[in-house]
Each structure stands twice: as C-alpha cells, then as structure tokens.
Image (spheres, grey):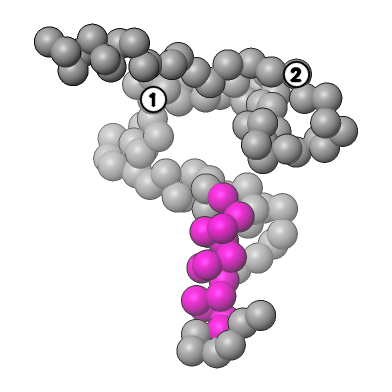
Amino acid sequence: MRVVEDAREDWVEGPEPVINATGVILHTNLGRAPLSREAVASTARAAAYCDLEYEKNRGTRGSRHDRVRALPLALTDAEGAHVTVNNASAVLLSLTALARRKEVI
C-alpha cells in the first residue's frame, strides 16, 4: 500500500541523544534534566508489575497519591500535600485554589 510505504519513508526514529553544549543546564529544548541512575532504576521497577496502587499488608487497593504524598508531608510537616507531574499543573492548581475569579498577572 502506498500509505504504508510513505509512512515508512517518512518515519524518523527518536528522540536521539545529543550533547548539551549550550551552557544552559536545564534546556527545555534538549529534553530537560537528565535522570540519575537511581531515577532510571526506579522507573524500570515501576514499569513492571508493582504495588503502585496495592496495599500488600492489607491485600486491598491502595492509592498512588498516598505513596507520593508521604515524602513532602514528612519534609515540611504540612497538613496536606499534592504532587503534580509538572510545574504548569502545580501553578494551575495553586491559582485555581488561591485566585479563583481574580486577575493574575
């Protein structure tokens, strides 16, 4: 089929490794900050079957939010915490909570 042939010709594998010689440590066009070896290992463990949302001690469904919320609560002694996947979502949630129907510059 012509569509399949065109797709194969136009397909580009990626992303590809590059050297960041820009002088900018966290360069958003170059994939952000590199992951540490520990983070890569944790990601590999989480990519397989794991107890992300399972309470092994109780044999019941758990919450991934409880797992990630524990660290900021322990570090800050705060009453509550919510972990987001990026800064944009954190800003949106904060503004929604603190500046609803108000002008934000």
- Find residue 55 and report its image quarter: top left
Gap in angstroms between the C-alphas marked 2 and 1 = 34 Å
Label 1 SS: loop
Label 2 SS: loop
Q: Residue at x 83, y 25 (%)?
A: 21
Q: Report the residue marked by disc 1.
A: 50
In this rendering, position of residue 61 left or right of residue 23? left
Residue most toward the right?
Answer: 23
User: Is 65 one of the magenta-colored residues?
Assistant: no
Q: Residues within 10 Å of mark 2 (few under 14, many from 20)?
A: few
Give residue 45's position: percent from left, percent from top: 48, 20
Q: Nearer the viewer, residue 69 or 48?
A: 48
Q: Residue at x 69, y 27 (%)?
A: 34
| Range of magenta residues | 86-99
Front tag of 2 and 1: 2
Q: Residue at x 35, y 39 (%)?
A: 53
Give residue 15's position: percent from left, percent from top: 53, 21
Q: Is residue 67 above or below residue 23?
A: below
Q: Indicate which disc residue 97 carries.
A: none
Secondary structure, magenta segment, majority class: helix
Of the residues shown, which amino acid type is indicated by label 1?
Answer: Cys
Q: Residue at x 63, y 47 (%)?
A: 71
Give residue 20's position: percent from left, percent from top: 77, 25
- Find residue 18 and report its image quarter: top right
Q: Nearer the viewer, residue 101 or 85?
A: 101
Q: Residues within 10 Å of mark 1 (few under 14, many from 20)?
A: few
Q: Earlier in the sequence, mark 2 or mark 1?
A: 2
Q: Report the residue marked by disc 2.
A: 19
Is residue 57 visible from the viewing direction of this image? Answer: no
Residue most toward the bottom?
Answer: 102
Of the residues shown, which amino acid type is indicated by label 2?
Answer: Ile
Q: Nearer the viewer, residue 55 or 43?
A: 43
